[in-house]
Amino acid sequence: EVQLVESGGGLVKPGGSLRLSCAASGFTFSSYSMNWVRQAPGKGLEWVSSISSSSSYRYYADSVKGRFTISRDNAKNSLYLQMNSLRAEDTAVYYCARAQGSISMIFVVTSFDNWGQGTLVTVSS
Amino acid sequence: EIVLTQSPATLSLSPGERATLSCGASQSVSSSYLAWYQQKPGLAPRLLIYDASNRATGIPDRFSGSGSGTDFTLTISRLDPEDFAVYYCQQYGTSGTFGQGTKVEI
């Protein structure tokens, strides 16, 4: 059974930093592209970032480009999101999601076939 | 950026009825790279349909997707009580955006 478990969320002040983690199990993590998707309280879904299986390709939504960095450690079956210069509008539940297809030079975002339970990030003074 | 507009915002139906949800794109979605998700309160979304018309693993056949270009539809042939939820469409490929959601309520 595919399992994705996020951690690292919490309360942070504007301008602060936070690092989210996602522990994967139940599938060959190193073979799959991965993503972060967020959902502000009471709002819809927003793709945040994607990374290919070997980390060769990394993409970001314009709203987080230059502030967030996606990475992965295939030896540890883990996905990460380093979030810097956080803003109030970054407040959301952040989901780790497995890509259905492969991220490549031309394929930036896929559909998402498995999701974690999410971790809440609150940016507030 | 491709903007997806879902209609209606809310659909009020009874168990056993047919539900038809629409997703319109501001420009053509290449290769029908369109997905549908179901989300229940407090839970993560679940993939229902990908590539416009392919059911994801384990999804009942009462869910079907159709469409191409700029107009896509999710149909639930006979609503089960567990189907009352919010549904999102998503386009993917060279960019990725979601619609604002349709709530299917009793």
Image (spheres, rainbow, N blue to C red):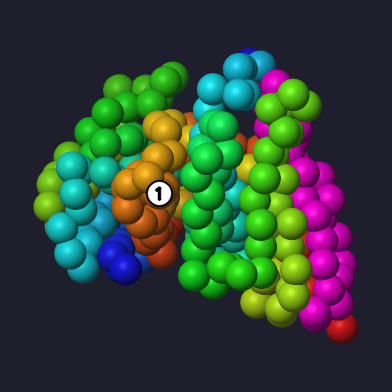
Q: Is residue B46 visible?
A: no
- From the viewer's perspective, is residue A106 above or below residue A1? below
Q: Is residue A23 magenta?
A: yes
Q: Which residues are magenta?
A: A2-25
**A47 vs B89, nearest the viewer:** A47
Q: Position of residue A100 (x, y in %)?
A: 43, 31
Q: Residue at x 21, y 61 (%)?
A: B24
- From the viewer's perspective, is residue A68 above or below residue A71? below
- From the viewer's perspective, is residue A86 above or below residue A2? below
What is the chain letter for disc 1? A
Figure quadrant of residue B27: bottom left
Horizontally, residue B82 falls left or right of residue B91, namely: right
The residue beneath circle 1 is A108
Figure quadrant of residue B79: top left
The amino acid sitting under disc 1 is Val
**B83 vs A61, nearest the viewer:** A61
Toward the bottom, the furthest residue is: A125
Secondary structure predominantly adopted by residues drawn in magenta: strand
Q: Looking at the figure, which quarter contains the N terminus of chain B?
A: bottom left
Horizontally, residue A81 falls left or right of residue A40, namely: right
Q: Position of residue B80 (x, y in %)?
A: 41, 33
